[in-house]
Amino acid sequence: MKAFAELLDRLAYEPRRNGKLRLLTRYFADTPDPERGLALAAITGGLSFTNAKPNVIRGLVEERTDPVLFGLSYDYVGDMSETVALIWPADRGVNTPSPSLSDVVNALGSTGKAELPALIARWLDALDETGRWALLKLITGGLRIGVSARLAKTAVAGLGGLKPDDIEEVWHGLKPPYEALFAWAEDKGERPENDDPAPFSPAMLAHPIEDSDFEKLDAAAFLAEWKWDGIRVQAASGAAEDGTQVRRLYSRTGDDISKAFPDLVDALPANATLDGELLVLIDGRVQTFNTLQQRLNRKTVSAKLLASHPAHMRVYDVLRLEGEDVRGFPFAERRELLEALIGKHDHPRLDLSPMVPFRDWQALSDARADPATHGAGKDADAVEGVMIKRADSTYVPGRPKGPWWKWKRDPMLIDAVLMYAQRGHGKRSSFYSDYTFGVWRETGEGRALVPVGKAYFGFTDEELKQIDSFVRKHTVNRFGPVREVIHGEDAGLVLEVAFEGLQRSTRHKSGIAMRFPRISRLRWDKPPREADTLETVIALLPEAERA
């Protein structure tokens, strides 16, 4: 556990990507199995512990320390694991050896809920501050060390002559502690084989396109299609040993979500792997993302919900067809195969995402700005933008720069007034970086601000310092860790807020919820009385939800 804790600690303080990569590769090279495999699983999100919840940790520390002192410390530090690691009063009379990483993982997986608190307390007593912090990060699942799963897999590939894409290709057929993977990476074993008849294939992703990129790109070399406002999924099917068809639906990251969407799984064609967008289609029209959310994050689904929110897949690409891997074919050729497949299959639960014709970048810009009159028709409100793909591009894992680009529609913008602020977590724990903002609404007693959203990113470090200073100087009330900031028609800070979409919400006082809000600009030049109204915001709702 000590070596794992030191790794996490150094990764947390290492800002450079290559520096993190070196630390990971060295750790994987020097650490034996199964410890390094369990560390890889922890970093890539492959470990979860049913009975180990944050409330268990909170209960333990409040037994050992004054609950008020802990609450004040947590408010100041801003991170649960770090606070407990620092404040924990270890029982020095307990002579318990420091656990290894495998000891911890095995015990967390087998210990009952009633015995777990005492076990964690013994570990906390045996570890130093860094060890306690790493243990708690492992238990709660929020490492926050600036390492993506892709970077960790790149480090494994660096043990030998493999490429990160090689690791991606076999990853989803493996389970911790990945001993066969490390043996292959170090040229001590064969390539791990996946005999799953309907395996997941790592998704290919696109880069956001900037204005300067268009000058370097030849429009004639690219094709375009709509980017739909749903959930990216992969549908796979194949023949098992007994000849029956195995059909599965995966999320973009490879989670099997088949049980939540039996209506769509049953509709999949045989012996094919398709890449597309999960949507809800009612009366031939794509519904809002808010409607789709009613089907998401469910282990099972009721017959009533199946009938009221029918799942649909709008297909972008084909990866495998009749046992053949076609990812190496050019996109234009794969598109022809896909058109033939969907035309032959002809099922109402699947359709083909239409291409967007354009002759130059200006024509594509016009289509992006007005999808309704450029082929999207009644589904225009569900268009997020356009995808731009080289006609000769192969399908490769990850996000290679050049073959695929995404050009999202311009974000919606409103001017809102800062109302409440709270400290962030991790490196932002000393700054008020989480903001609640509101717009004006008419009431029986005049105009009042109503909260419409929260944001914790979008600003620069310099802007963060400016907002933090404003919050500290203009706090008018406190509610635990939350500060109420001065806000009225003549006093307050106006924030320009950008967001990707709006939807109706019964959980919010304003009746609306924003998608991906972020602070776009600080409006020091604008008095709060000139901020937007709720009526102005509601007018940005999709037409179907505006009434």
Image: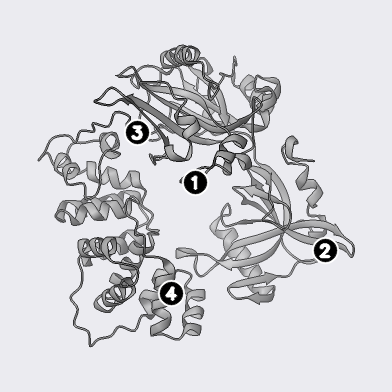
Left or right of 499? Residue 329 is left
Cα separation, mark 4 vs mark 1, equals 28 Å
Image point (20%, 65%), residue name: 100
Left or right of 134? Residue 541 is right
Rendered location of residue 131, percent (x, y): 28, 70
Image point (59%, 40%), residue name: 304
Mark 1, other Cα within 10 Å: few <14 / some 14–19 / many ≥20: few
Mark 4, other Cα within 10 Å: few <14 / some 14–19 / many ≥20: some
Q: Amino acid at mark 4?
A: Arg
Cα separation, mark 1 vs mark 3, equals 20 Å
Circles 1, 2 touching at the beta carbon (< 8 Å) = no
Mark 2, other Cα within 10 Å: few <14 / some 14–19 / many ≥20: some
Rendered location of residue 61, percent (x, y): 40, 79
Q: Which residue is mark 3?
A: 200
- Disc 1 versus disc 2: nearer the observer: 1
Left or right of 408? Residue 218 is left
Disc nearer the start of the sequence (3/2) = 3
Q: Is residue 70 above or below residue 426?
A: below
Inspect this view and state whether residue 524 appears: no
Residue at the limit of the structure toward the bottom, as seen here = 93
Q: Is residue 373 above or below residue 114?
A: above
Q: Which residue is mark 4?
A: 58
Rendered location of residue 519, percent (x, y): 63, 53
Disc nearer the start of the sequence (4/2) = 4
Cα separation, mark 4 vs mark 2, equals 41 Å
Residue at the limit of the structure toward the left, as seen here = 188
Q: Which residue is mark 2?
A: 489
Q: Amino acid at mark 1?
A: Arg
Circles 1, 3 touching at the beta carbon (< 8 Å) = no
Q: Which residue is mark 1?
A: 298
Name the colouring of the figure: one colour
Disc nearer the start of the sequence (4/3) = 4
